[in-house]
Each structure stands twice: as structure tokens, then as C-alpha cells.
Image (tube, grey):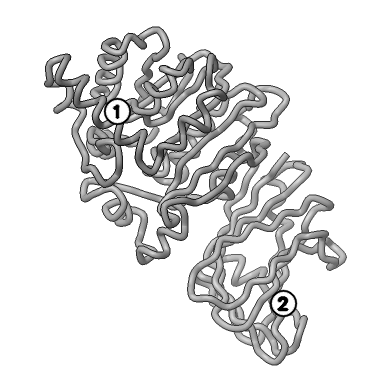
């Protein structure tokens, strides 16, 4: 069960169209008479349609015409109304009752009530009373405002309603923005992105959204940053041949770094620190092996998937380091090594083993005449169909 109270309290307010226009409480808008409410709402919607997000309607209007779309975190309903006017059938799901009451009232005033329905998301994050078979799920800067595991629970429950061939579309705050703003803890970052009352904001990129939806089969349609990397737009096609079964979502393993560092991670010229992050200094010499992590104890958790992915959060402080997946014989699996050069920022790297099962993660020096220095802060193993 998710404790959504602090989030309900925050998201009674929403942007007045553009992020630069300030915010307004839905309860304040509900207090207006019909003509005043509609005029105020239309003015905000016009700013949304002509601002940094104006490209959404031209891009997706035809895609959604006479299609069912489920929106997670519908706010004041700007996207719902815009696409419903162009023929979409839209379900607005939100955690704030006043937001949904506002949407119903505006939809009635705009004579769109037959194309828009509302759904209150309860603390159990269930969508059991909604009929499956949605053509798209629209997630516009909403569930990245709760911790990853809560967002994963909600996302997987919604994904079960998406038909094969349907689309998962999401606006997120990317890691570039988080790094630029000082890499604060997520419970503090929300105050920078969305104001003092914001309890959480967490960066995402396409790989992290894939991890949240794992092991659903997804094909990337669009993945790009905009507005100086303040935002990232991700558009996935669900390529499953049948409805997604949330029961399959147990096929992943979060790797506990500390005991692995002490017991299973060997090599390197210096002792490894047992607390996160791992720290490894590579021996000097091009291609010199530095360390190896045994992945076999964790493979049972990801089942018999055709592809295994390992997500790593890391930083190379000096030189250049190769990180790759090897089989039981110590041979690198095809296209399963990444070369990371020194830089101040933490990097998020995904390695995939599509041909054979990885036995170990291997680190080696890839800078002639210099020792590589790498830190690894997290590791996450998951299955992909």
C-alpha cells in the first residue's frame, strides 16, 4: 500500500498552462461560476498549447483519434480535452478528487462528457475497475514524483490494461537536469523542480523507464530531450503478443553491493571498499583485468529470459575502464562491453547479454599508461523478453 497523503496534498495545485505561468489549486478553480471557470481554463489551455509543449497535439492527434487513452496524473485535464476534441476517448486517472471534479465540470461545459471519464487512484494503486484494452497510456510528468518502487507498482498495474501494440508515452525529468541542479536527494529535488510543497522528484531516462516496466517487451518509437534537457519525451510500443501479466514482474533482482564487494568481487591493486560505492583502481597496462563480479547467484531471480540486462550507476574518476559481461569460460559476450572515460558526473550504463547467459561482470583497464579508477554506486539485474 502506498502512503499517498503527502502527494495528494501537493498535487491539488497544477501549472497554469506553462511551467513559467505559476500554479493554481483545483479547489480555487472549482469555486468559480461556470462562465468564469471556462474562461480561466481556456486561457490556461491556450498557453499550454502554444508553449513548449505545443508539438504534442500535431504529433499525436491522428494517432489517438477514436482510440482509448488512459492518463496517469491528469492534473487539470489540458491534454485530455485537447485530444478529446480531436476524437480521442480519454480516461483521466488522478489521486486528487478535486482535480477530477474540475475535469468533469470542464468536460461538461465543453460538451465532451461522452469522450472523457475520470478515475480516482486509491492508495492500493489498482486499476481493477477499468476495462482493459487501452490503445495508449499517457504519463505526463506525474509518476516520477513518487519513489521508484511506488511508481513501478502503479505503472505495472496500468500496463496490464494496455493492448498489444499499444503505446506507453511519458514525459520525465532527465538525469542531465538532475546533475546540472547539483544531484540532490530526490526528496529535496522536488522542491527545485516543482516548488516547496513537492515531496519527491526522481530523474528518469529510457532505460530507467524500461526497468520500471520490466520485463514488458518494449520498442522505442521516440526518445529525446528538449528545453535544454529540462524534459525528456519517451514513446514506447508494447510489443507483447498478449496482455501484460503483472505476475511476471518479479523477474528482476536488485544487487546488494556491500556483501558482493566483500565476498565475491576480487582483483584490482587496492582493497575494495565494502560500502557503496565500490571503488576499484585498475592495474596499469592496456587491457589489464581489474576485478570481476559473479552474477550467477542472481540469475535465478530473472528467470529464463532471452536477454538479461544489467543497469549500473558509475563514475570513472581517472583513465578509461571497460565494463563487460563474460560467460562461464571468461569470454566476452557479443556487444556486451562498454568503455567509459573519466568524467566528474555519475553515468547510468546498461549492459545486455542477448547471446548467452552472463556469468560475471568484468572490469579492465582501457587506457595505456594510466590506471583507471572507477566507482560503482548501484547495480540492478533484470530480464528482457
Q: Is residue 287 visible?
A: yes
Q: Which residue is mark 1?
A: 76
Quadrant housing the N terminus = top left
Name the residue rendered at 60%, 72% in the picture.
Answer: 262
Left or right, 152 with respect to 243, comes to left
Give percent across and percent down for residue 149. Answer: 47, 43
Name the residue rendered at 42%, 30% in the picture.
Answer: 72
Q: How many neighbours does mark 1 have within 10 angstroms: few (below 14), some (14-19), or many (20 or more)?
A: many
Give percent across and percent down for residue 28. Answer: 14, 28
Q: Which residue is mark 2?
A: 364
Left or right, 142 with respect to 164, comes to left
Between 101 and 107, the one lying in front of the other is 107
- Kindly report which numbered mark, 1 or 2, lies closer to the viewer in this rendering: 1
Task: Place residue 222 in its image quadrant.
Answer: top right
The answer to whether the residues at label 1 and label 2 have Cβ atoms under 8 Å apart is no
For mark 1, give the secondary structure: loop
Q: Is residue 358 above or below residue 37?
A: below
- Closer to the N terminus: mark 1 or mark 2? 1
Name the residue rendered at 82%, 59% in the picture.
Answer: 334
Name the residue rendered at 52%, 13% in the picture.
Answer: 131
Between 68 and 159, the one lying in front of the other is 68
Between 156 and 370, the one lying in front of the other is 370
Q: Is residue 118 above or below residue 155?
A: above
Amino acid at each position: 500500500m502506498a502512503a499517498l497523503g503527502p502527494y495528494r496534498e501537493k498535487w491539488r495545485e497544477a501549472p497554469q498552462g506553462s511551467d513559467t505561468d505559476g500554479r493554481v489549486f483545483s479547489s480555487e478553480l472549482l469555486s468559480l461560476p461556470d462562465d468564469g471557470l471556462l474562461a480561466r481554463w481556456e486561457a490556461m489551455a491556450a498557453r499550454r498549447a502554444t508553449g513548449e509543449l505545443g508539438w504534442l497535439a500535431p504529433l499525436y492527434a491522428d494517432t489517438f483519434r477514436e482510440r482509448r487513452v488512459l492518463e496517469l496524473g491528469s492534473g487539470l485535464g489540458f491534454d485530455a480535452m485537447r485530444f478529446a476534441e480531436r476524437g480521442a476517448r480519454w480516461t483521466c486517472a488522478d489521486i486528487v478528487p478535486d482535480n477530477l471534479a474540475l475535469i468533469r465540470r470542464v468536460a461538461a461545459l465543453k460538451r465532451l462528457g461522452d469522450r472523457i471519464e475520470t478515475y480516482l487512484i486509491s492508495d492500493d494503486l489498482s486499476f481493477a475497475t477499468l476495462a482493459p484494452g487501452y490503445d495508449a497510456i499517457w504519463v505526463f510528468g506525474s509518476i516520477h514524483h513518487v519513489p521508484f518502487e511506488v511508481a513501478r507498482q502503479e505503472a505495472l498495474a496500468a500496463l496490464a490494461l494496455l493492448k498489444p501494440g499499444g503505446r506507453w508515452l511519458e514525459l520525465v525529468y532527465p538525469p542531465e537536469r538532475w546533475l546540472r541542479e547539483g544531484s540532490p536527494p530526490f526528496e529535496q529535488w522536488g522542491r527545485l523542480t516543482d516548488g516547496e510543497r513537492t515531496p519527491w522528484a526522481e530523474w528518469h531516462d529510457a532505460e530507467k523507464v524500461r526497468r520500471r516496466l520490466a520485463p514488458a517487451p518494449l520498442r522505442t518509437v521516440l526518445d529525446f530531450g528538449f528545453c535544454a534537457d529540462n524534459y525528456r519525451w519517451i514513446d514506447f510500443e508494447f510489443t507483447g503478443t498478449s496482455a501484460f501479466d503483472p505476475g511476471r514482474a518479479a523477474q528482476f533482482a536488485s544487487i546488494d553491493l556491500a556483501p558482493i564487494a566483500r565476498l565475491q568481487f576480487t582483483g584490482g591493486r587496492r582493497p575494495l571498499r565494502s560500502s557503496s560505492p565500490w571503488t576499484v583502481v585498475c592495474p596499469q597496462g592496456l587491457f589489464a583485468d581489474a576485478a570481476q563480479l559473479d552474477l550467477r547467484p542472481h540469475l535465478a531471480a530473472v528467470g529464463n529470459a532471452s536477454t538479461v540486462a544489467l543497469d549500473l550507476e558509475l563514475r570513472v574518476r581517472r583513465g578509461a575502464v571497460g565494463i563487460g559481461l563474460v560467460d562461464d569460460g571468461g569470454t566476452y559476450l557479443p556487444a556486451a562491453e562498454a568503455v567509459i572515460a573519466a568524467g566528474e558526473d555519475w553515468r547510468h550504463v546498461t549492459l545486455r547479454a542477448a547471446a548467452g547467459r552472463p556469468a560475471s561482470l568484468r572490469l579492465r583497464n582501457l587506457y595505456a599508461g594510466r590506471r583507471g579508477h572507477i566507482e560503482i554506486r548501484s547495480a540492478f539485474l533484470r530480464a528482457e523478453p
